[in-house]
């Protein structure tokens, strides 16, 4: 059985974790396969899902309990690669999402959770720690520190309040949400999307002394794109509104 499934539609590349018998736990093969999808630089919006009863139970314990450091680096690289993708990355989660699964969704751009989804950082219960996922999760939601430390099960509604996810609802509501997101994203300039995504990722790490220059230089760089000049010309001449 393939550990991930890929189905291409007109505007979306559907990518599914496909280890339902293991609750889609992330083993090395799955990590490497998923990373390669993003290293191949997809040209369409990516929708990430999980087959079976849940999105992802986290890292495969049989693997992570004894994986050498170079393999652990592969998991961190997966999160980095998803987070740095040049195209929008949507994720649909359901059932339950533990540990590394929360790390994976945190690396995505737009996050939908079924209303009955449960989340948990179970690492401390096993004597482990959420070391590889913490940078990505805390960047999205600093409030997750409490849940990393207490291992409490929390709901999609709580995740929404704490900005871990963007929307929660039914399967039917997800379809409407996906259609709306893909439609909006399809109207954007891909280069501007990618550069803005990188800008927003880097912005929190810029020092107070350098932030003004960083923002100015970022805008100046984007203005150099011939597309920008053409669009502004059309707007000013009322060819577009």
Image (tube, rainbow, N blue to C red):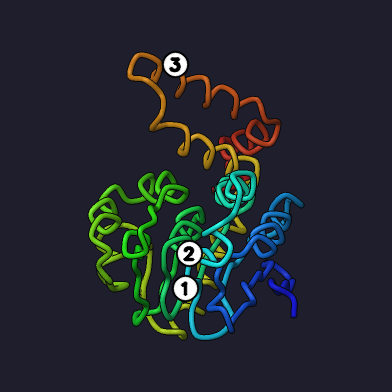
Marks 1/2 in contact by CB < 8 Å: the verdict is yes
84 w.r.t. 186: above or below: above
Compute the Cα span from label 2 to label 3: 37 Å
Q: Earlier in the sequence, mark 3 or mark 1?
A: 1
* Residue 140 position in % (x across, y down): 38, 49
Q: Residues within 10 Å of mark 1 (few under 14, many from 20)?
A: many
Q: Earlier in the sequence, mark 1 or mark 2?
A: 1
Mark drawn on residue 213: 3
Q: Which residue is mark 2?
A: 101
- Front residue (pair 8, 226): 8
Q: Residue at the location (58% across, 52% down)? A: 75
Q: Which residue is mark 1?
A: 93
Q: Residue at the location (47% across, 60% down)? A: 100
Element carrying mark 1: strand
Q: Residues within 10 Å of mark 3 (few under 14, many from 20)?
A: few
Compute the Cα span from label 1 to label 2: 9 Å
Q: Residues within 10 Å of mark 2 (few under 14, many from 20)?
A: many
């Amino acid at each position: 059985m393939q550990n991930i499934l890929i189905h291409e539609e007109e505007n979306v590349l559907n990518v599914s974790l496909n280890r339902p018998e293991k609750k889609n736990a992330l083993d090395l093969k799955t990590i490497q396969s998923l990373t390669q999808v993003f290293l191949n630089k997809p040209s369409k919006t990516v929708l990430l899902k999980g087959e079976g009863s849940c999105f992802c139970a986290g890292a495969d314990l049989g693997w992570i309990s004894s994986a050498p450091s170079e393999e652990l680096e592969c998991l961190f690289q997966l999160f980095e690669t998803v987070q740095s993708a040049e195209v929008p990355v949507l994720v649909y989660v359901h059932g339950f999402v533990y540990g590394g699964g929360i790390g994976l969704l945190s690396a995505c751009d737009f996050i939908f959770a079924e209303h009955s989804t449960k989340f948990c950082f179970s690492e401390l219960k096993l004597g482990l720690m959420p070391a590889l996922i913490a940078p990505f999760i805390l960047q999205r939601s600093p409030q997750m520190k409490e849940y990393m430390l207490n291992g409490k099960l929390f709901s999609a509604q709580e995740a929404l309040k704490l900005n871990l996810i963007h929307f929660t609802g039914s399967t039917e509501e997800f379809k409407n949400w996906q259609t709306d997101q893909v439609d909006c994203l399809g109207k954007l300039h891909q280069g501007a999307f990618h550069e803005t995504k990188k800008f927003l990722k880097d912005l929190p790490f810029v020092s107070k002394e350098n932030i003004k220059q960083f923002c100015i230089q970022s805008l100046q760089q984007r203005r150099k794109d011939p597309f920008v000049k053409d669009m502004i010309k059309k707007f000013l001449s009322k060819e577009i509104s």
